[in-house]
C-alpha cells in the first residue's frame, strides 16, 4: 500500500489580529499534523497544494518555522511536492520566490508546467536543475500547476492536452490551486465543475487548495481546507488535511484528518435592544458572557458582536472597561469586540440586523447598482463582482490579474 498526505493553505507567517501567538499557531498546526499523522502513518510523500506561506515576503521567523517543519519530513525521508498559490507565488516579472528557495535547498520539490509560445509543456523532474513539472514515484505521477487566477478556466484544456501527451501512468495526481464554484460562499472568480471535465479520466486525484474548507466531488476532486482559521467565519468550517491510501490496484481511500493542534474560536452575539440604560446593558451582557463560558484546550479567539437597537448614547458606555471585564470572564487569546448596534431613532432595513459584514456590503452595493438602469437587471451579479474585486485588491493581486478577472467577467456576461 502507498500513502500520502494532502495539505494546502498552511499560511505560515500570518500574524492574525497582530498577535504573535496566532502567528505561531499556523506553524504549530503544520508541525503537529506532521508529527501526529505524516510520520506515524509512514506516508510515502506529502502534497502542499499552494500557499505554504501567507505572503510573498517572508521574515526570518517564518522561514525558520518552515525549515523546522520540513526538516521533520526530510529526516523521515518523506518527500514534499508543492506548488505555489496566490499568496506565495511569484509576481509578474519575478523569477525567484521563497518556495523556490526551499526547493533549491532540497526541502521540497516545486512542480510547475512550462509555458512556451502559448502551449503548456510538462517536463519530468530534473535533479540537476532542481526543476520540473512532474515527478514519478512507485507508479504514482505527481503533476504541478501554477496559480492561474481568473484565467484558470481557459488553462484547463491545454493542461489536459499536456497530460494526455504523457505516457500512461497507473495513478496521476494533479496539484491545482483554485476554487470551485458552489464551494466559495459569496466569492466570485472560481471555476465551474464542468470546466474541470477535460481532466477527468486523465487525473485520478485532483489535489486542490485555495478555499479554506474541506470538500470533495465525485471521488476525484479533493480540497482539504486550511489547517488553521484565517478569519472568524472560517472557524465554523470543517478543515484540515486528507490522508490517502492506495491499494495494489491504485484505488484510493481518502480520510479526513483532524485532531491536530488548532486554535479554538468562539463566536458570541448579544442583542442589546432590550437594554434601556448603559448599566442594564452591561449587567445583561456580562451575564450572557458568563453563561456562554466554555472549557477549551487552549485560550480561544473570541468574537463578541453587539447588535440591535441602542436606546441610549453609545458614548455613555466605557467600551474599554467593558472589554477588560469580558476578557477576565473568558480569558481569551484575543477578544474581537464588534459594535454593530444602531441608534434606536435610525430606520433599520428589514433583515439587516445581525447580518455579517460581507452580506451587508453585498446588500448595499446591490441596492446602489439597482438605481442605475445599466446594471439594474444584474445588480446582484455586479455586487458579487465588486466584492470579489475588493477581496483580490486587499490580497494585493497585481493589476494585470485584476484586469484579467474583469475581462473574464465581461466576456461571461457578453
Image (spheres, rainbow, N blue to C red):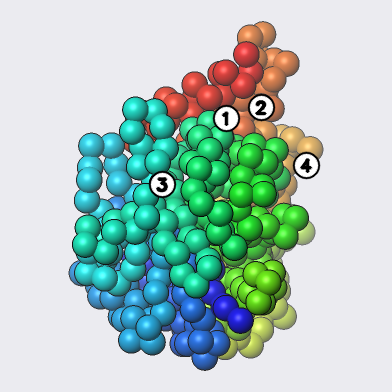
Q: Which residue is mark 3?
A: 122
Marks 1/4 in contact by CB < 8 Å: the verdict is no
35 to 88, vertically: above or below: below
Secondary structure found at label 1? helix
Real-space Cα distance between discs 1 and 4? 22 Å
Q: Is residue 56 left or right of residue 82?
A: left
Real-space Cα distance between discs 4 and 3? 52 Å
Near-viewer residue (100 or 253): 253
Real-space Cα distance between discs 2 and 3? 37 Å
Q: Which residue is mark 2?
A: 381
Q: Quadrant of the N terminus?
A: bottom right
Near-viewer residue (307 or 179): 179
Q: Which residue is mark 1?
A: 385
Q: Earlier in the sequence, mark 4 or mark 2?
A: 4
Q: Quadrant of the C terminus?
A: top right
Real-space Cα distance between discs 4 and 2? 20 Å
Q: Position of residue 413 (x, y in %)?
A: 63, 18
Q: Which residue is mark 4?
A: 351
323 to 360, vertically: above or below: below
Instruction: Check disc 3: other Cα within 10 Å, few if <14, some if 14-19, many if 20+.
Output: many
Which of discs 1 and 4 lies nearer the camera? The answer is: 1
Instruction: Check disc 4: other Cα within 10 Å, few if <14, some if 14-19, many if 20+.
Output: few
Near-viewer residue (192 or 281): 192
Which of discs 4 and 2 lies nearer the camera? The answer is: 2
Q: Position of residue 95 (x, y in %)?
A: 22, 45
Question: What residue is shown at x 79% (from left), y 38% (from top)?
Answer: 350
**Residue 243 appears anywhere in the view:** yes
Question: What residue is shown at x 50% (from left), y 43% (from top)?
Answer: 165
Question: What residue is shown at x 62% (from left), y 21% (from top)?
Answer: 412
Real-space Cα distance between discs 1 and 3? 33 Å
**Residue 36 appears anywhere in the view:** no
Amino acid at each position: 500500500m502507498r500513502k500520502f498526505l494532502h495539505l494546502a493553505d498552511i499560511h505560515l507567517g500570518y500574524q492574525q489580529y497582530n498577535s504573535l501567538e496566532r502567528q505561531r499557531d499556523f506553524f504549530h498546526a503544520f508541525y503537529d499534523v506532521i508529527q501526529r499523522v505524516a510520520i506515524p502513518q509512514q506516508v510515502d510523500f506529502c502534497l502542499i497544494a499552494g500557499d505554504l506561506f501567507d505572503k510573498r515576503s517572508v521574515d526570518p521567523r517564518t522561514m525558520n518555522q518552515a525549515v523546522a517543519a520540513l526538516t521533520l519530513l526530510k529526516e523521515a525521508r518523506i518527500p514534499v511536492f508543492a506548488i505555489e498559490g496566490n499568496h506565495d507565488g511569484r509576481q509578474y516579472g519575478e523569477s525567484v520566490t521563497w518556495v523556490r528557495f526551499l526547493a533549491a535547498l532540497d526541502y521540497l520539490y516545486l512542480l510547475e508546467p512550462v509555458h512556451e509560445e502559448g502551449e503548456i509543456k510538462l517536463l519530468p523532474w530534473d535533479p540537476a536543475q532542481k526543476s520540473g513539472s512532474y515527478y514519478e514515484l512507485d507508479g504514482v505521477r505527481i503533476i504541478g500547476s501554477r496559480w492561474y487566477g481568473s484565467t484558470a478556466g481557459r488553462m484547463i484544456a491545454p493542461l489536459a492536452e499536456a497530460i494526455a501527451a504523457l505516457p500512461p501512468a497507473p495513478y496521476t495526481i494533479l496539484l491545482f490551486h483554485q476554487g470551485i464554484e458552489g464551494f466559495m460562499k459569496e466569492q466570485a472568480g472560481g471555476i465551474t465543475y464542468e470546466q474541470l471535465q477535460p481532466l477527468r479520466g486523465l487525473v485520478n486525484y485532483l489535489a486542490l487548495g485555495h478555499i479554506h474548507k474541506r470538500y470533495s466531488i465525485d471521488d476525484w476532486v479533493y480540497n482539504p481546507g486550511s489547517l488553521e482559521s484565517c478569519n472568524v467565519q472560517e472557524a465554523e468550517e470543517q478543515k484540515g488535511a486528507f490522508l490517502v491510501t492506495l491499494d495494489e490496484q491504485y484505488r484510493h481511500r481518502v480520510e479526513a484528518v483532524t485532531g491536530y493542534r488548532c486554535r479554538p474560536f468562539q463566536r458570541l452575539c448579544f442583542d442589546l435592544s432590550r437594554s434601556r440604560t448603559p448599566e442594564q446593558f452591561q449587567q445583561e451582557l456580562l451575564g450572557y458572557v458568563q453563561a456562554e463560558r466554555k472549557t477549551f484546550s487552549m485560550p480561544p479567539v473570541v468574537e463578541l458582536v453587539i447588535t440591535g437597537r441602542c436606546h441610549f448614547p453609545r458614548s455613555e458606555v466605557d467600551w474599554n472597561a467593558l472589554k477588560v471585564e469580558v476578557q477576565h470572564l473568558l480569558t481569551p487569546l484575543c477578544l474581537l469586540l464588534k459594535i454593530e448596534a444602531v441608534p434606536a431613532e435610525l430606520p433599520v432595513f428589514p433583515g439587516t440586523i445581525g447580518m455579517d459584514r460581507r452580506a451587508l456590503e453585498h446588500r448595499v452595493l446591490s441596492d446602489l447598482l439597482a438605481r442605475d438602469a445599466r446594471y439594474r437587471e444584474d445588480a446582484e451579479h455586479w455586487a458579487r463582482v465588486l466584492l470579489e474585486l475588493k477581496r483580490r485588491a486587499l490580497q494585493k493581486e497585481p493589476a494585470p490579474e485584476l484586469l484579467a478577472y474583469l475581462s473574464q467577467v465581461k466576456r461571461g456576461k457578453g
